[in-house]
Structure formats: structure tokens, C-alpha cells
Amino acid sequence: MHAIVMTFDLVDMTPEQYAQLSAELAPSFAALPGLLTKIWLTDADRGRCGGLYLFEDDTAADGFLKSALAFSVAQNPHFAHFTAQRFTVDQTTTAETQPKIMVVPALDPGWPQEGW
């Protein structure tokens, strides 16, 4: 599993305009091959936004980074100080630290617990 964290500052775009753009783009992100989830990130106090992307594998992450969609985010004139960082997910430790959301398969076959 691979993760990509993209962040940027909003320039000449209101939070409402960004929310509208995000809603318009959401189906395109959802259709990315190998995307497990995209978590939308917002720091309203600083006008900083971005996303945490989890992909099935290296090939899917590479495909996204080379896609027109990723390029459109990186080149958007309303997104300044754009950064993209890529990580490999430590699945062993992550499996031990996900009490409320299952990001990777649990090591304990009894998870999730009753009442979760």
C-alpha cells in the first residue's frame, strides 16, 4: 500500500469555491485505478488544503502521479506552495493502530469488535 500527501495554499479562491470544485472533482478521484481512499484535508485558519491518498500498490500511485488529474491539481493557479510527498504504508504497525477505521486488514481476525 502506498500513500501520497498533497498540500497547497488557496489563492484567490474562497473556501466555498474550493468546496464546489472539490465536489465536482470527487467522482474523478473516486474513479482512479487502485485508489483505496482519498481523505480531503482542510486547515481553514491557514487557507491550506490537500489530500491524503491511499493506493493499493506502487503502480497505482505512479499512475496517479503521472495522470492529467494530478497535473491539474499541481498546476492549478489557485493552489500555491503545492507539495506532494509519497510514502509506503507500514501495514504491520498500521494494523495495530486503527481502532475506529480499518485502513489495512486487521491482524486479529476478530476485528472489528462488537459494537464498533
Image: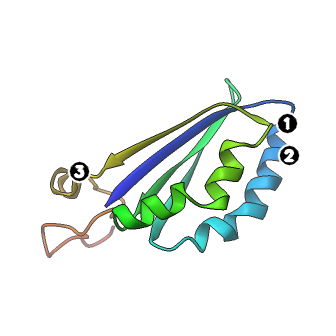
Q: Which mark is residue 13?
A: 1
User: Residue 57 location in percent, x, y?
Assistant: 34, 65
The reply to whether dot 1 and dot 2 touch (C-beta < 8 Å) is yes
Task: Give the quarter of the figure containing the N terminus.
Answer: bottom left
Q: Residue at x 13, y 66 (%)?
A: 107
Give the labeled residue for mark 3: 97
User: Would residue 68 be visible to someone looking at this image?
Assistant: yes
Within 10 Å of the Cα at label 1, are there few (<14), some (14-19), or many (20+) other Cα atoms? few
Residue 60 placement, left or right of 69? left
Q: Are marks 2 and 3 in contact (CB under 8 Å)?
A: no
Q: CA distance from mark 2 to mark 3?
A: 35 Å
Q: Amino acid at mark 2?
A: Gln
The residue that appears at 77% across and 50% down in the rendered structure is: 19
Task: Tell me the quarter of the picture where residue 82 sits.
Answer: top right
Residue underneath mark 2: 17
Inter-mark Cα distance, 3 to 1:
36 Å
Looking at marks 3 and 1 on the same chain, the residue that comes earlier in the sequence is marked by 1
Between marks 1 and 2, how big is the CA–CA gap? 6 Å
- Residue 7: image location, x then y, percent: 58, 37
Task: Name the residue at the front extreme.
Answer: 66
Contact? badges 3 and 1 (CB < 8 Å): no
Q: Secondary structure at mark 1?
A: loop
Amino acid under disc 3: Thr
The answer to which quarter of the image holds residue 49 is: top right
Q: Secondary structure at mark 2?
A: helix
Left or right: 16 as drawn, with respect to 76: right
Q: Secondary structure at mark 3?
A: loop
Residue 14 percent across, percent down from the top left: 85, 37
Name the residue type under label 1: Met
